[in-house]
Image (tube, grey):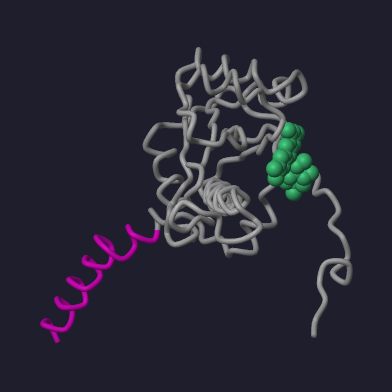
């Protein structure tokens, strides 16, 4: 009898040491649908919160898992964390975007290396040409923004930007095509979901 009591105590002790501790440390599990539903273009950021280089690297590691043409992985990320660089990028995205990203602590410029995706032996493989590089870049950015949401961050993809000035500012080589600027931070307000088209306008089943 004494032996059983002792074993029960040992088991409880182990559960407290390992089992319960793990549960407390776990992040609340979000389904893919929950992440997609809560991801929005955020245009109002909490300026009091910061993000570390390790946290951004973690998001980029997920973005690197995105598929790409013949695994060319043409996408690159130029990440501004330093407040001066962040401010300089915000000056190159137009007044509206600058206002909307005011509190975002991190600004990212995404590019793709030209003439890799969609190319075979230096020739465009089909009529899409460089469009495949942009396609791969968009896939990578999609992984990035969804991972960011899973980690509790928010983003805004911006196509309105001065690419020549960004190239100068961040020393981006000429063989890279500059795509979106992405702000990264924490939402200050919950954005409204813009309506989506009805399914029948988007899909045709055969
Ligand atoms: C390629 C691209 C460019 C965009 N450019 C801008 C932009 O310059 N400024 C902005 O406020 N939103 C921009 N957006 C965000 C869209 O307006 C937004 O994704 C769309 O309205 C749907 O809203 P949601 O992202 O909250 O679902 C852009 C989105 C994409 C994908």
Q: Is residue 64 above or below residue 125?
A: above
Would you say 69 lies left or right of 162 here? left
Q: Position of residue 31 (x, y in %)?
A: 58, 65
* Residue at image coords 51%, 57%: 28
Where are the magenta residues, as a range? 1-23
Main secondary structure type of the part rendered in magenta: helix
Q: Is residue 40 above or below residue 163?
A: below
Q: Position of residue 104 (x, y in %)?
A: 60, 27
Q: Quadrant of residue 37?
A: bottom right
The residue lying toward the viewer, choosing from 52 and 80, is: 80
Q: Quadrant of ligand 1?
A: top right
Is residue 190 something that shows in the picture?
A: no
Q: Quadrant of residue 53?
A: top left
Image quarter where the C terminus lies is bottom right
Whether the magenta-drawn stretch holds residue 69 is answered as: no
Which residue is the extreme one toward the left?
3
Q: Position of residue 87 (x, y in %)?
A: 57, 15
Would you say 148 lies left or right of 16 here? right
Q: Is residue 199 above or below residue 92?
A: below
* Residue at image coords 47%, 58%: 120
- The total number of labels drawn is 0
Is residue 144 something that shows in the picture?
A: yes
Image quarter where the N terminus lies is bottom left
Q: Position of residue 201 (x, y in %)?
A: 88, 67
* Residue at image coords 60%, 35%: 182
Whether the magenta-drawn stretch holds residue 16 is answered as: yes
Q: Quadrant of residue 124?
A: bottom right
């Amino acid at each position: 009898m004494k032996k059983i009591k002792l074993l029960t105590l040992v088991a409880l002790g182990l559960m407290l040491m390992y089992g319960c501790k793990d549960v407390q440390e776990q992040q609340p599990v979000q389904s893919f649908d929950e992440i997609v539903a809560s991801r929005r273009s955020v245009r109002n950021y909490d300026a009091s919160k910061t993000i570390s280089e390790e946290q951004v690297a973690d998001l980029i590691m997920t973005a690197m898992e995105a598929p790409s043409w013949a695994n060319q992985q043409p996408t690159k990320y130029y990440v501004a964390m330093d407040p001066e660089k962040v401010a300089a990028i915000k000056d190159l995205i137009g007044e509206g975007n600058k206002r909307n990203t005011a509190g975002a602590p991190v600004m990212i410029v995404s590019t793709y290396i030209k003439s890799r995706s969609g190319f075979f032996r230096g020739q465009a493989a089909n009529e899409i040409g460089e469009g495949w590089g942009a396609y791969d870049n968009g896939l990578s950015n999609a992984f990035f923004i969804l991972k960011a949401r899973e980690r509790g961050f928010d983003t805004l993809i911006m196509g309105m930007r001065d690419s020549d000035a960004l190239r100068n500012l961040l020393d981006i080589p000429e063989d890279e095509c500059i795509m979106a600027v992405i702000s990264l931070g924490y939402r200050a307000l919950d954005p409204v979901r813009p309506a989506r088209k009805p399914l029948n306008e988007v899909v045709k089943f055969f």
